[in-house]
Each structure stands twice: as C-alpha cells, then as structure tokens.
C-alpha cells in the first residue's frame, strides 16, 4: 500500500468534523483514489483516527461495526436510523466543500514541512509546475499528465523524469478525481 496515499486518507478522516460522517466515496474523491482502497486503508490503518466518522454511502458502517461506532456516535450526537443499520446521511453528512478546504489546508501544512523535492527537470518545467502551485513531488500526483503537458515550458522529457521518480518511490500517478 502506498504510504503517501494512506497518510492522505487518514488526514482526510481527521478533518471530518465531530458529529458528522463522510462516505468512503467522499474520501476517495478528495484523495484521488477509489472507495474500495479507502475501505482497505480504514480497515488496516484507522486505529488512531476517528474511524467512526467514515461510513458507506447509505450511512451504514457495515461489517458488524455499528456496535464499535455506537459509543462514539452517542458521544457526538450521531443518531442511528430506525432500521438500526447506521445513520441518516441527510442528518449527519459532512459539508464536502468545507471538508475539502480543511483537507487542503492540512495537506499544505504537512507538505510545507515534509514534502519530497522535485527531481531535476529543468528550470522552465520547474517554473511551469510552480505556476500551478506544484513545488513538491506529492503535489505532482494531484494533476493528470495531460494537464502538466499543457503547461508552457513543461514537456515530455520533464514528464518522463517525474514518472521515473514516482516509479522509483513506488508511488502511483492516479488520474485526478473530477471536480464536484
């Protein structure tokens, strides 16, 4: 599992406000992965984050997890639906725009102190990336290759150098999730 993806998903979970929930798909769109991968990350790594705030699209935790969620939900004012399977998304769904802003601020803070420097790709390509706010390798993977190739001063050679560095680190270059 890509450590950077795990860190991004867990950072997103930490941004879900108290008393609110987000669906696996919400977090997937935010972090540029799939709902299934978010579920796997939650299953394997969520011990130290508010995991009870992440549910399926219908508000159900699934997998018999409701009993683990229930004490946290009671503490945060999240009520269980009459069918007893989860919570009503209409009542407890996090504001996705606010969640996106909080996640981006958190990610900016982390990358400001711990971002991976870009490889040597040439001054024009480096300036082109900086023009869209990309100054670390972590930020590169937030943009599809076609977008980068459309930047003035950024060409196939710079793209190949970035792809080589991503491969060397074992990182993937997912397509950017469509905007909401």
Image: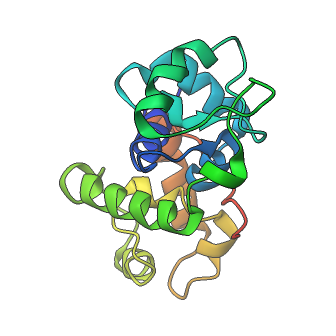
Q: Residue at x 72, y 20 (%)?
A: 62
Q: Residue furthest bottom?
A: 152
In-image side of 83 versus 35 (left or right):
right
Q: Nearer the viewer, residue 62 or 126?
A: 62
User: How far across and down, in percent of the image, does residue 13 sit?
Assistant: 46, 41
Does the rendering let one see residue 24?
A: yes
170, above or below 173, in the image: above
146, above or below 14, in the image: below
Q: Residue furthest front?
A: 82
In-image side of 94 versus 111 (left or right):
right
In-image side of 48 versus 30 (left or right):
left
Looking at the rendered structure, the number of numbered marks drawn on it comes to: 0
Q: Residue furthest left?
A: 113
Looking at the rendered image, the quarter that the C terminus falls into is: bottom right
Q: Residue at x 40, y 70 (%)?
A: 134
Kindly indicate the quadrant of the structure image that contains residue 88: top right
User: How far across and down, in percent of the image, does residue 1 sit?
Assistant: 54, 24
Q: Nearer the viewer, residue 84 or 135?
A: 84
Q: Residue at x 55, y 26 (%)?
A: 41
Q: Nearer the viewer, residue 69 or 23?
A: 69
Q: How is the image coloured?
A: rainbow
Kindly indicate the quadrant of the structure image that contains residue 177: bottom right
Q: Residue at x 53, y 14 (%)?
A: 68
In-image side of 3 versus 116 (left or right):
right
47, above or below 7, in the image: above
User: How far across and down, in percent of the image, does residue 45 sit?
Assistant: 45, 21
Does the rendering let one see residue 2?
A: no
User: How far across and down, in percent of the image, does residue 87 sit?
Assistant: 67, 37
């Amino acid at each position: 599992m890509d450590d950077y993806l795990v860190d991004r998903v867990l950072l997103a979970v930490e941004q879900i406000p108290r008393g609110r929930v987000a669906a696996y798909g919400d977090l997937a769109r935010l972090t540029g992965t799939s709902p299934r991968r978010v579920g796997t990350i939650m299953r394997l790594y969520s011990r130290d984050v508010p995991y009870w705030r992440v549910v399926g699209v219908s508000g159900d935790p699934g997998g018999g997890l409701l009993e683990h969620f229930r004490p946290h939900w009671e503490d945060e004012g999240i009520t269980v639906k009459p069918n007893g399977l989860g919570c009503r998304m209409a009542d407890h769904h996090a504001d996705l725009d606010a969640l996106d802003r909080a996640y981006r601020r958190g990610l900016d803070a982390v990358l400001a102190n711990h971002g991976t420097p870009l490889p040597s790709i040439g001054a024009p390509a480096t300036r082109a990336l900086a023009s869209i706010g990309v100054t670390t390798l972590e930020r590169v993977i937030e943009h599809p290759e076609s977008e980068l190739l459309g930047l003035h001063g950024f060409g196939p050679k710079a793209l190949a150098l970035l792809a080589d560095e991503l491969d060397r680190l074992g990182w993937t270059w997912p397509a950017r999730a469509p905007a909401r």
